[in-house]
Image (tube, rainbow, N blue to C red):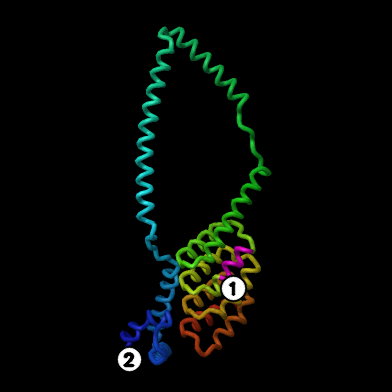
Amino acid sequence: MNCRGIKDMFPDYLIGDLDHKKALMVQAHLADCAACRGELESLSDVWTKLGVLPEEQPSDGLRSRFYTMLEAYKQGMEQEKTTAGLTQAFSRWLESWWPRRPALQFGAALLLLVVGLTAGFWLKPPSYTAADIDPLRQEVQAMQATLAMSLLDHGSASERLRGVSLSARMEQPDERLLDSLLQTLDADPNINVRLAVVDSLYLFHSHPFVRQHVSDSLAKQTSPLVQVALIDLLVNMQERRAAEALKALIESDQLNPEVKLRASQGLEKLL
């Protein structure tokens, strides 16, 4: 088969959707054609990045939420009209008590200024120290971690992607959350969710628990896209302990040729 016919099968080949006969045909062509190997590598890089983009779908409650917001907006407009009327009435009442003569107006303004300064001195808000704020910050982070772990266990892939996104925004995730992320990396049925986890782990690569588990997870992956993403992560982390995992991956008979090439290149950079 010529190069054009082989290239038409690249998308199905990358996601493992080709039958065995066609997959062998593609592998045999790639072994002899450097141009097609290069194009497949570029296509794999693009798909790795596109795979982390969640597919946005409108929820079933969108219509009800819209009408709820519309009703709230109407009520807000009515309340604003009522507030404006009360403000105008108060302004007219205050104007009726305000003195007409300039001298009296100046004296009244001076009196109000003194009263305001005195009240501000006695009623100034207390100052807060770092010791007061730190417990609040820790409590907020604990709530965010709990919410993220709950989303990671959700049945919907889009909700699990939200959980990964929320985890990535945390500065110092605890080990429970990191463990949930790593379990999602190992076992989530959705390739996009696993790719999103790999991206988030770039932010936490200095954690020893993460570094070791990413190396172990490489052998558990079957998707070429996830395997390539993990290899790139290990190379960027300079995790030299992953050399054995890469060697074992290269020796696999069923390994995608693109993944084998990326693993060989990654092994050279780590050694």
Assign a secondary structure to mark 1: helix
Spatial CA span between label 1 and label 2: 38 Å
Q: Residue at x 46, y 8 (%)?
A: 104
Seen in the picture, residue 203 relative to 13 is either above or below; the reply is above
> Identity of the amino acid at label 1?
Val
Magenta part, dominant SS: helix
Quadrant, the C terminus: bottom right
What residue did someone put label 2 on? Answer: 1
Q: In which quarter of the image is residue 76?
A: top left
Residue 21's disc number: none
Q: Earlier in the sequence, mark 1 or mark 2?
A: 2
Name the residue: 55% across, 21% down: 116
In this view, the residue farthest toward the right is: 131
Q: Quadrant of the N terminus?
A: bottom left
* 243 in magenta: no
**What secondary structure is found at the residue carrying circle 2?**
loop
Up-down relation of residue 226 to residue 176 (above or below): below
Region in magenta: 176-183
Query: Height in image: 43 above or below 101?
Result: below
Front in this rendered view, residue 23 or 182: 182
Contact check, label 1 and label 2, Cβ < 8 Å: no
> Which residue matches tag 1?
214
Query: At 65% from the left edge and 68% from the top edge, which residue is drawn?
Result: 208
| Nearer the observer, 177 or 233 | 177
Q: Where is residue 3 in the image (x, y as percent from the top left)?
A: 33, 86
Measured from the top left, where is residue 243 in percent x and y? Answer: 61, 80
* Badge 2 density bin: few <14, some 14–19, many ≥20, Cα 10 Å: few
Q: Is residue 181 magenta?
A: yes
